């Protein structure tokens, strides 16, 4: 009996490890999250009932052990030095000339890699098992963070490829926090009344050095390996081969790497990634170039600080300083007041910036910023610019205070204990209605194309809508009365409103604007309950049975549905014909019926489960691996071997736009509206 239990535990561990690898390293899951959870639960139950079956590298141990008092300091096998920087092409050329001179007229090659904006970590393996993980520390002595490192799912706890090495070895690489984890963390912190992290690197550093490993686990870090060492020195003769070997052994190695035969090729790689870096799911701050041959590396040697065989080309920060001219308050759809910085317009990386978000009063206090100050502003990707710090305090500066009454309706403002945000409590505040309408109609929610700021403002000023439900009563004739509205646009808008009735339950739920219920929570609620009535009638306890729904979110949902006006709104939307039941089963007559899809890589706007739901709602099937039976492969950024397979089998590959096209929907370019 015991023996069969132990065999089952072993089998589960192997299976879970394989699925972790497929999901976190290759980004090619073969099973659903729910199936994964079931396996994990079975293993956990087995281990709890039979503690002797528990192994330190069991996948159940990734969730984080006991909090500890402090970190043990441990010397590195060889110093973890830093890299010299090249801040422009001239400095890069100088570096290359130095290399050429030192190597006389020998041929050499570079390996170009992305410079991941995280923190480095060394991980020691012995007997092919993860033994110890150290932060860089001061370069010579690191801090032991083994328990925390174990929570990083892309870091193998043991190497199953036995041809790898039987000797102890060490991997060095970068711990990063993906943008999505970072955004989610900051949103959660804000909701919990905590201050936001300034950037993913700080958040990753905090997570890796958290005394409680469950904190690390919740922050969803990632690890990219870039060095393979033995006894403190390179294990193989070529850096490129080390990277390949690491990938083969199950480590996540950044796929964007290139062998460059000369400076021109290296510069081309650098320029290419400068234009594309915002599309990566994590932040990079440059490109690292390393001489490929270890023999040449050794001959080039090191200075006291850094190797002479590598250089970090740093992209110029997308930052500029300008004057904070004013701070205005924006009232959001849940009544939250957000201070918005009005800046003297400044060009940052080719884009003129005149607004930045300040989030809340705590953020203003943290920055110590006052109106009139000169501030450093940073722009990253399509996110709203933010203020990094005060560069110079103005002589005539004056502090900003959250108003005592709502700047739009004059209503009462409250800041509840433990909350970072102040809110206007007037549920009829016109600003709240305006924002609710915009949120409801926005892409990713009810997708009512054409229902932007200008139209909503007109509808409100003419008293045509008093709630989101009124949108469904609008007529072409009413729209024709509005400024700059022709027959064609009016009927198109009405058509778009009509079309939105068929959006899935999760979207409608998100559209209701329940505080703390965004896209993800709405999807989880929809999956769990299957219908709006079940959600509206669920108790706080029952709501909390849903993954990721805690007391605060549950309380907010309850409160929302207890309010009479919200119940009435729901009834009116039901009458308008919105989907209040989840499309659990594929529509057999949907436009994609009979078609099989495989998803790979990160799409620009759709999350994987969202893309899956959309395909399934339209009648299509989503499977894990590409075969001759696959109809389409939908590929995004960092698509892996599935894409190669698709090409091999001549299967049509779609990007997100292509997917939208066959879904009959419109591309989701993200809504470039002002700060909130
Ligand atoms: S090589 C001595 N490769 O950048 C070799 N570093 O400025 C140093 N980093 O401390 C590391 N991506 O934290 C290397 N592909 C990459 C990297 C990388 C990010 C970080 C690392 C290092 C710092 C050096």
Image (cartoon, rainbow, N blue to C red):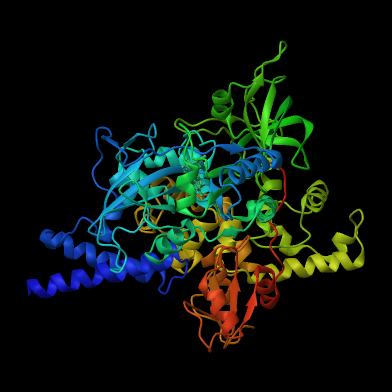
Q: In the rendering, at what x and y percent does residue 168 appear? A: 26, 54
**In the rendered view, would you say 420 is above or below 563?**
above
In percent of the image, x 35 and y 34: which residue is there? 140
Q: In the figure, residue 399 lies in which quadrant? A: top right
Q: On the rendered image, what quadrant is the N terminus found in?
A: bottom left
- For the residue pair 275 and 375, the one nearer the viewer reads as 275
Residue lying furthest front in this view?
104
Whole-percent x and y of residue 485?
90, 59
Foreground residue, 381 or 194? Answer: 381
Residue 400 in view here: no
Residue 145, given in percent of the width and then of the height, sits at 31, 42
Q: Quadrant of the C terminus?
A: top right
Direction left: furthest residue: 1
Look at the image and tell me whether residue 592 can be seen.
Answer: yes
Residue 75 rendering spot, x and y as whole percentages: 29, 36
- Compared with 250, 652 (above or below) is below
Q: Quadrant of residue 602?
A: bottom right
Please determine whether, in this image, residue 578 is positioned above or below residue 386: below
């Amino acid at each position: 009996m015991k023996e069969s239990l132990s065999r089952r535990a072993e089998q589960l561990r192997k299976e879970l490890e394989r699925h972790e690898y497929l999901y976190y390293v290759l980004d090619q899951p073969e099973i659903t999250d729910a199936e994964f959870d079931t396996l994990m639960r079975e293993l956990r139950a087995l281990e709890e009932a039979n503690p002797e079956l528990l192994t330190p590298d069991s996948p159940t141990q990734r969730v984080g052990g006991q909090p500890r008092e402090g970190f043990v300091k441990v010397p590195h096998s060889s110093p973890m030095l830093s890299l010299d920087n090249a801040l422009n092409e001239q400095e890069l050329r100088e570096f290359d000339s130095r290399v050429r001179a030192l190597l006389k007229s020998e041929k050499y090659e570079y390996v170009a890699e992305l410079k991941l904006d995280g923190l480095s970590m060394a991980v020691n393996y012995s007997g092919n098992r993860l033994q110890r993980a150290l932060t860089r520390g001061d370069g010579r002595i690191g801090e032991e963070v083994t328990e925390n490192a174990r929570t990083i799912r892309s870091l193998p706890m043991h190497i199953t490829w036995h041809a790898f090495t039987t000797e102890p070895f060490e991997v060095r690489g970068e711990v990063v926090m993906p943008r999505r984890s970072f955004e989610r963390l900051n949103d959660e912190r804000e909701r919990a009344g905590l201050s936001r992290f300034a950037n993913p690197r700080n958040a990753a550093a905090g997570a890796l050095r958290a005394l409680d490993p469950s904190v690390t686990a919740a922050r969803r870090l990632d690890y990219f390996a870039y060095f393979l060492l033995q006894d403190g020195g390179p294990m193989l003769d070529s850096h490129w081969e080390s990277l390949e070997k690491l990938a083969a052994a199950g480590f996540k190695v950044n796929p964007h790497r290139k062998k460059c035969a000369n400076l021109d090729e290296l510069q081309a790689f650098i320029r290419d990634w400068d234009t594309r870096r915002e599309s990566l799911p994590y932040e990079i701050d440059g490109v690292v170039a390393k001489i490929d041959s270890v023999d040449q590396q050794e001959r080039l040697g090191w200075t006291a600080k850094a190797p002479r065989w590598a250089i970090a080309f740093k992209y110029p920060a997308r930052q500029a300083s300008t004057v904070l001219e004013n701070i205005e308050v924006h009232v959001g759809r849940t009544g939250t007041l957000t201070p918005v910085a009005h800046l003297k317009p400044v060009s940052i990386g080719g884009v003129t910036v005149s607004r930045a978000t300040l989030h809340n009063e705590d953020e203003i206090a943290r920055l110590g910023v006052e109106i009139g100050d000169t501030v450093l502003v940073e722009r990253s990707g399509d996110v709203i610019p933010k203020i990094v710090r005060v560069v110079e305090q103005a002589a005539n500066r004056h502090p900003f205070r959250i108003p005592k009454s709502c700047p739009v309706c004059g209503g009462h403002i409250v800041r509840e204990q433990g909350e970072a945000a102040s809110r206007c409590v007037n549920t009829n505040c016109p600003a709240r209605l305006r924002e609710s309408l915009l949120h409801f109609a926005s892409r990713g929610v009810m997708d009512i194309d054409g229902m932007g700021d200008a139209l909503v403002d007109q509808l409100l000023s003419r008293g045509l809508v008093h709630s989101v439900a009124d949108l469904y009563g609008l007529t072409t004739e009413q729209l024709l009365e509005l400024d700059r509205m022709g027959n064609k646009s009016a009927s198109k808008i009405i058509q778009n409103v009509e079309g939105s009735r068929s959006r899935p339950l999760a979207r409608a739920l998100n559209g209701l604007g329940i505080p703390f219920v965004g896209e993800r929570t709405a999807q989880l609620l929809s999956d769990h309950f299957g219908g709006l009535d079940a959600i509206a009638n669920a108790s706080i306890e029952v709501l909390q049975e849903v993954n990721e729904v805690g007391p605060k979110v549950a309380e907010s949902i309850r409160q929302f549905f207890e309010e009479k006006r919200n119940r009435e709104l729901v009834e009116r939307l039901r009458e308008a014909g919105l989907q209040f039941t989840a499309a659990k089963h594929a529509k057999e007559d949907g436009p994609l019926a009979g078609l099989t899809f495989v998803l790979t890589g990160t799409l620009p706007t759709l999350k994987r489960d969202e893309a899956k739901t959309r395909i399934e709602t339209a009648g299509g099937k989503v499977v894990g691996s590409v075969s001759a039976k696959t109809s389409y492969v939908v590929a995004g950024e960092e698509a892996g071997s599935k894409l190669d397979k698709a090409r091999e089998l001549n299967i049509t590959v779609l990007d997100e736009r292509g997917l939208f096209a066959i879904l009959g929907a419109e591309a989701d370019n993200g809504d470039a509206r002002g700060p909130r």
